[in-house]
Image: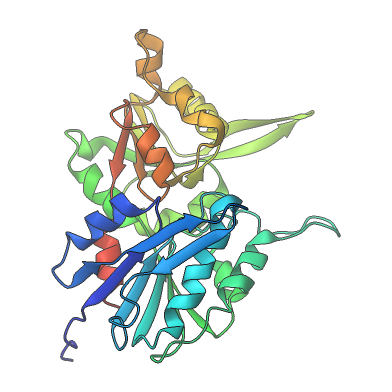
Amino acid sequence: MEKPNKKQVLLFHCVESEELARKVSQQSDLIKLQSINWRSFDDGFPNLFINNAKEIRGQHVAFLASFSSPAVIFEQLSVIFALPRLFVASFTLVLPFFPTGSFERMEEEGDVATAFTMARILSNIPVSRGGPTSLVIYDIHALQERFYFSDHVLPCFETGMPLLKQRLHQLPDADNVVIAFPDDGAWKRFHKMLDHFPTVVCAKVREGDKRIVRLKEGDPAGRHVVIVDDLVQSGGTLIECQKVLAAHGANKVSAYVTHAVFPKKSWERFVHKDDENSKKAFEYFWITDSCANTVKEIANKAPFEVISLAGSIADALQI
């Protein structure tokens, strides 16, 4: 079947995502950066202006968002809800990190599943002339969250795993790499995408009031073990996994997460110090640039290495 001609996309972005947006636009001459005046009134509420609003009529338009905190979500939603109504040919929202994705379950009556709340908000984005909004999200915490969205948006779930595989094949010891999953949830989520690598699975078991990480299956002895998960917060689970893998003979341990949330600068516990013990903990820690603020903070700090989503986002804008 003959592929349709590629479309020109006008890409708007929030303040935090400016660097990633520039990288996306550099991937293709068909992606043109656009601008928004992000200002505030004296009372703190947004005072926003979409530049060249008339010129974008009949064009394919996208917005690169970053919902890094509740404080920035409202101003971005205001723009997201305005753009499709400017007579654009189609509208795509790229939200690399769906921040409430890990709050998708209720354990008792009264729990609020904020993943569902966010999905309902985004499901009410106005329809453009081209139809429902395309919503691009990377490595959402649980695939079943696609059913939280209504038919007014079209969720497109992308993944950073091909970028990780590409990086792993560049390693000098690529033939000795083993993939480790910190729990069964991560294994179910990603093992099919990494099935040509040997795997190790860890598990959290309860001992009294504590939850302890244990090796469930696989053999890490003598291998370069790469722990893979969708996101990291405090990093406690990754550190406990590293200790277990090292105790079972792993030669090196590295980690990959698509979303490096790292609240309260928790990334600092992974930074290589001058002492040898720190350098032995994690050989590499790969993250993507889905969380822009973290990328700025960890720049040039070993063992961190950023794998950009720019090329993947550029491809997704052509879907």
Snapshot quadrant of residue 264: top right
The reply to whether residue 60 is visible in this rendering is yes
Q: Residue placed at 20% from the left, 45% from the top? A: 169
* Residue 9 position (above or below residue 174): below
137 displayed left or right of 126: left
* Residue 59 position (above or below residue 287): below
The reply to whether residue 196 is visible in this rendering is no
- Quadrant of the image for the C terminus? bottom left
Q: Residue placed at 21% from the left, 39% from the top? A: 175
Q: In this rendered view, identify the residue nearer to me: 144 or 4.
A: 4
- Quadrant of the image for the N terminus? bottom left
301 displayed left or right of 123: left
* Residue 66 position (above or below residue 83): above
Q: In this rendered view, identify the residue nearer to me: 40 or 126.
A: 40
198 displayed left or right of 263: left
Q: Farthest residue toward the top?
A: 275
Residue 171: horizontal and vertical position, in percent?
A: 19, 37
Q: Residue placed at 63% from the left, 37% from the top? A: 204
* Residue 89 position (above or below residue 121): below
Residue 287: horizontal and vertical position, in percent?
A: 36, 42
171 displayed left or right of 95: left
Q: In this rendered view, identify the residue nearer to me: 292 or 37.
A: 37
Residue 267: horizontal and vertical position, in percent?
A: 46, 30
